[in-house]
Amino acid sequence: MEHKLSIYNTLTRKKELFEPINPPHVGMYVCGPTVYGDPHLGHARPAITFDILFRYLKHLGYKVRYVRNITDVGHLEHDADAGEDKIAKKARLEQLEPMEVVQYYTQRYHKAMEALNVLPPSIEPHASGHIIEQIQLVKEILDNGYAYESEGSIYFDVNKYNKDHHYGKLSGRNLDDVLNTTRELDGQEEKHNPADFALWKKAQPEHIMRWPSPWSDGFPGWHCECTAMGRKYLGETFDIHGGGMDLVFPHHECEIAQAVASQGHDMVRYWMHNNMITINGQKMGKSLGNFITLNEFFTGDNKNLQQAYSPMTIRFFILMAHYRGTVDFSNDALQAAEKAMSRLMEAYGAIGRIQPSAESTVSVAEFRDKCYEAMDDDLNTPIVISHLFDAAKVINQAADGKASLTADQIDELKSLFDTFLFDILGIKAEEGGGSGREEAFGKVVDMLLEQRAIAKANKDWATSDKIRNELTALGFEIKDTKDGATWKLNR
Ligand code: ZN
């Protein structure tokens, strides 16, 4: 089957056939976390969305270079150019070196991503390790006349840029919209125009994270890092740039302006954005009291949670929605996702119990094509999941003897789950939770039945009856057959 992957390009506002610049190579850049706090749900969604893209492109045979950065300098409290640096503030409050904060939260982020089965990117560059490249970018923009110096800081001249190019083309704004929605913040009087943004900031005496530059001791503006590092590792033009929808403006809009102002043309072919996550219909925020970190989800240790939710439950839940749709977290929704996922895992487990027949009574051939079709349609994971449920129905019927499948069909169903559920959607069996718990639990029942068989062989009827009666009281249905006992839990 020939694949024609279509993806929605935020820049052109339509689904486009994905055609890499230099096949089989694909360059993709995704904005990573600012590492000043524990990873939370807001981190899980872009990481999982672009993990699916990364996995699927590799599955299709592309050689993908996936760059996801770590922001460890220059992300100020009010976007790019006002307020204290987020890392420096945390370091000040905790009395740590800024790089201790960065190291600590980068490790926490990696651990959470590993738990979510998010594959590590090919390159994970730190902004603080690419100051030279960022200074170079600022120089080019200055040389081309799209920036100016003011009090030792360098600002992007949005007005000048907008005369030659369209500032706002990604977010669908024009300069008047931008000016109408720009807040006047303190300390901004250095700018010629409130829409201008900082490329380089002169550091105040109390500012710890600073580097020498031709203009001042200071630090780069937040938007610079992704333009500089994307170009360094993926080239002047590369295929895909992704991130959360909240980054479209100003971050990605500014990235486009910086790229065009420095090199004369766009850097990115396809811009992709995942939608946001809400909690019980509300935006997640510390001030709203509904802030839940990923670790709190995994342990259940948060007043908003009725129970712990395994990393795979979180992953499956996110994939049950299309990445461009909103996702609303609630205990009910997560519990439903947990049940749905374990139904798929149980069906996968039941494949081994199907007795092959010479003739089949059902068709399974279409599942694979349908799953590919859904993935090719802008990574439509909820549709893939619905096809897997249809396949699970067939598996369960066959396992219960209500349908017949040939040995080839049984192999095909197993391979369908291996490809789509495990390789592409990245779901895995979990130890001590989700399907892993089901599996361990099944093994314990098997062990008890083995003990009962031994007791019976020794004519120890008291023990044998006790095991049987107690399992029955717990809701198990035990059947003795000539090959030993089988069990079923009636819930
Ligand atoms: Zn970025």
Image (cartoon, helix red, strand yellow):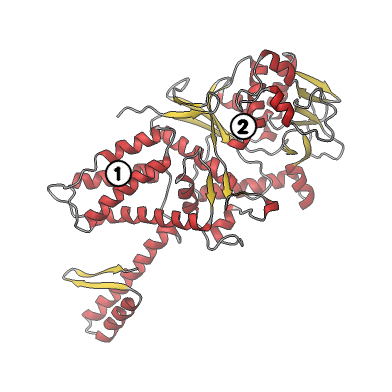
Quadrant including the C terminus: bottom left
Which residue is pictured at 23% across the width and 80% down the height? 456
Q: Which of 96 and 426 is in front in this view?
A: 426
Can residue 350 be seen in the rendering of this structure?
Answer: yes
Image coordinates for residue 175, horizontal then vertical, percent: 70, 22
Toward the bottom, the furthest residue is 462
Q: How far apart are marks 1 and 2 (CA)?
A: 38 Å
Say left or right for 403 vs 209: left
Which residue is pictured at 36% across the width and 69% down the height? 444
Q: Tell me the amino acid under the disc marked 1.
A: Ser
Quadrant including the N terminus: top left
Say left or right for 229 vs 218: left
* Residue under numbered circle 2: 248
Name the quadrant where ligand 1 sits.
Answer: top right
Q: In which quarter of the image is residue 242?
A: top right
Q: Tell me the amino acid under the disc marked 2.
A: Val
Which residue is pictured at 70% across the width and 27% down the height? 178
* Residue under numbered circle 1: 415
Determine the secondary structure under disc 2: helix
What is the crowding at mark 1: few (fewer than 14 residues within 10 Å), some, or many (at least 20)? Answer: some
Query: Marks 1 and 2: CB-CB under 8 Å?
Result: no
Q: Earlier in the sequence, mark 1 or mark 2?
A: 2
Can residue 310 be seen in the rendering of this structure?
Answer: no
What is the crowding at mark 2: few (fewer than 14 residues within 10 Å), some, or many (at least 20)? Answer: many
Image coordinates for residue 88, horizontal then vertical, percent: 76, 43
Image coordinates for residue 299, horizontal then vertical, percent: 55, 60
Residue 363 in the image: above or below residue 303: above
Determine the secondary structure under disc 1: helix
